[in-house]
Each structure stands twice: as C-alpha cells, then as structure tokens.
Image (cartoon, rainbow, N blue to C red):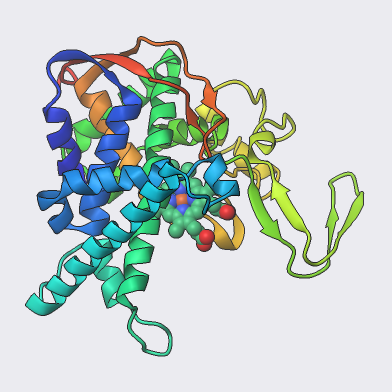
Amino acid sequence: MYYIQQDYFGKWGDVGVVDLKYEFNHILMLIASRCLLGKEVREKIFGEFYTLFTEIEEGVNLVSFMLPYIPIPVNRRRDRARIKLTEIVTEILRSRKICNRIEEDVLQKLMDSRYKDGRCTTEAAVAGMIIALIFAGKHTSAVVSTWTGACLLTHEKFLDAAFNEQKEIMRTYGDKIDYNVLLEMETLHSCIKEAGRMNPISFGLVRQAQKNIIVRTKEGVEYDIPKGDTLVNLVMLTHKLPHIYKDPKVYDPDRFRSGRDEDKVGGKFSYGTFGGGRHVCAGEAYAFMQIKIIWSHLLRNFELKLTSPFPKTDWSKYALEPKGKVMVSYKRYRVPGI
Ligand code: HEM
C-alpha cells in the first residue's frame, strides 16, 4: 500500500494545483485494486476496472436508491458493469486455481475461506463480496481523506501538530512505515476522526427492532418501541449535540484525547461515522490505515494550500461528499533536518 502511494505521488510535478477529490479517488482505487483484488487487476487491467467500477458508483444515487430497477441509462450501465466485473473476478479466481497460484490479497482470503460446516465459498459469492468491499471502502475513504485535507489546510494549529508528529516519527523510524508506526500517529488519527465527525458519510444508521424494546432517555423518559419498527440514529445530528461534543461546530481533534474522550461520554453510539453495533463498519482499521499512509506522505513531502473555498456538503449524494472540486496547490519539499 505504501509503495502504491509513493509511486502515485512521485508522478506529481514539483509544483502544481490538483483537485484533492479526484486525486484521492484515483489513489484509493489503485490501493483497492492491488490490496483487495490483487496483482492481476492492478498490473494488467486497471484502466478497464476503473471505468467499470465508476459506472457502478454512478448507479448509486438517491433515484436509484428509491427505484433501483427503473430502466434508465445510468442503471443499465451499472448492471452491465456489475456483470462484466463479476466475469473478470471469476476469471482471476479460476486462473489462480488452475495454476495453483497463491497471492497475498483479500481476494485470496475470500477464496480460501470456508463456512462453519466446511463448505467452500462459491465463485459468485467471492465475486459479490469483493465488489461490495471495494464499494464500501474506496469512495468512503476518498471522501474522508478529502475532508481531512480541507479541515487541516484551514486549521493551522492542527496542521502544525500533525506535521510535528510526522517529524518526530521520522526521527525515530525514518521513512519506514509499517502498521505499528501508523498506530503511533495519534494526532493524525484524531485529525481524520474529527473530519469524519463533522462530515459523516451517512445521514443516519437504520435498524429494525427485532423485538419489543424500551428506550430510556437520560432524563428518565421511557419510549416503547414495538417489534418491527424502524429506528434511525441521525448521525449528522448526534455529532452536533452540545452535551456530547463541546462547541460541536468547531474542528477540534483534541476532543478525542484521553481525559476529554468526548466520543464516549454519550455512550457507544456517540460517534457514528463508522456506524455501530452488530453492523459496525468492518473496514474501519483498514480505512484509517490507508488514509494515514496518504496523509503522512503528503505532510512529509509537500507544502499544501487550499485554493478553493472550504467545500460545502453535497446533499444530493447517497454517500455524502464535498461538493465540487477541492483545489489545492502544492510545492514538493522534504521535512527539513531529517
Ligand atoms: C473512512 C472510510 C469508511 C467509512 C466512513 C465507512 C463507514 C461505514 C458505515 C457508516 C457503515 C454502516 C455501519 C452501520 O450500519 O452501523 C459501514 C459498513 C461497512 N463497511 Fe465501512 N466505511 C469506511 C471504510 C470501509 C472499508 C475500507 C471497508 C473494507 C475494505 C469497509 C467495509 C464495510 C463493510 C463490509 C460494512 C458492512 C458491515 C455490516 O453490515 O456488517 N468500510 N461503513
């Protein structure tokens, strides 16, 4: 993963202006194609994969969410792309099996997985799961990376703190970044987490009550929720409650530091960017890992400035994202004295 992003940013010039949203989407697609799908896609058919996957993503919007099968061009393209992607994945699975080739990627893990009763996973199930994983993880990570950039580049105090943390870590480990080094980047972690609090991807988390339940508020008021009712945790709203988050409209990554721990005071559903409970995001650790790798590389190697206004939220998208382009000017440099 680290090499993919070094290679990617290596192709930027010494100075320039880029749209962060576009760049992050691209690099996260490269990472997904290598780490989830594997060498075959990354090295041979990345262009085709990128086009097909974009067609699937374009088919996920509010209209398609309400009416998934109406025969409009965007839905037709989405369905054709899904079939073609399944064919590509199935071909890779078969070729690995025939040649007895074992790779190190998530596709291989899914291929090798077994149900509790010992049955193998089917090709269709593996193809479906891998496409779903890319869908769940690529766009979301690109969006949170972009919001992190927009927030950091407009909050000098935290940009400096994240930069100084990189300097410290480079003094100890140099350019070597592995999982344990990433875990030490606590300031960067909080900066990403806070960008996600202020700009959650989903409007809300939806669940159906599986039995009659009683909900008791902190004031002691009780509500009966009958079995079968739909419940929604409006993440956008929860993240702005002042009795949970002090000055909720202020970008303040320090609110997650030990001692304040604001994401825990209102109970385990106070922080909902990655959902919660049984269906909590399965890729949270992986998402932080990829976003931290990207931002640690940018902080170490580029001076960045946001040149477009701070982005507004695009409410027309099923997965909320920054509206329009997020333009950033960059100058290549190296953290001094290291
Ligand atoms: C910053 C990036 C990400 C964000 C903000 C995010 C957010 C979410 C949210 C809100 C949910 C719904 C949780 C719920 O209903 O309680 C979810 C579910 C899920 N996410 Fe993520 N996600 C991210 C990255 C990833 C990545 C990288 C992967 C895997 C590669 C992934 C895999 C999944 C899966 C499999 C589920 C479904 C879990 C289930 O239903 O049991 N996500 N994610």
295 or 101: nearer the eye?
Answer: 101
- In this view, 9 is above or below 275: above
Give the residue drawn at x 24%, y 58%.
37
Q: Is residue 88 left or right of residue 311?
A: left
37 or 218: nearer the eye?
Answer: 37
Quadrant of the rendering where the C terminus is positioned: top left
Q: Hey, which residue is sitting farthest right in the picture?
A: 221
Q: Examine the image and state in which quarter residue 229 appears.
A: bottom right
Residue 283 seen: no
Q: Hey, which residue is sitting farthest front in the picture?
A: 71
Give the residue drawn at x 38%, y 33%.
145
- In this view, 308 is above or below 114: above
Q: Is residue 252 left or right of residue 44?
A: right
Residue 260 lies, in percent from the top left, at 61, 35
Marker count (numbered)? 0
- In this view, 290 is above or below 128: above
Residue 147 seen: yes
Q: Examine the image and state in which quarter residue 93 appears.
A: bottom left
Q: Hey, which residue is sitting farthest bottom in the picture?
A: 117
Q: Is residue 81 left or right of residue 102?
A: right
Residue 250 lies, in percent from the top left, at 59, 20
Residue 20 lies, in percent from the top left, at 32, 24
Give the residue drawn at x 56%, y 41%.
63
Residue 326 lies, in percent from the top left, at 38, 19
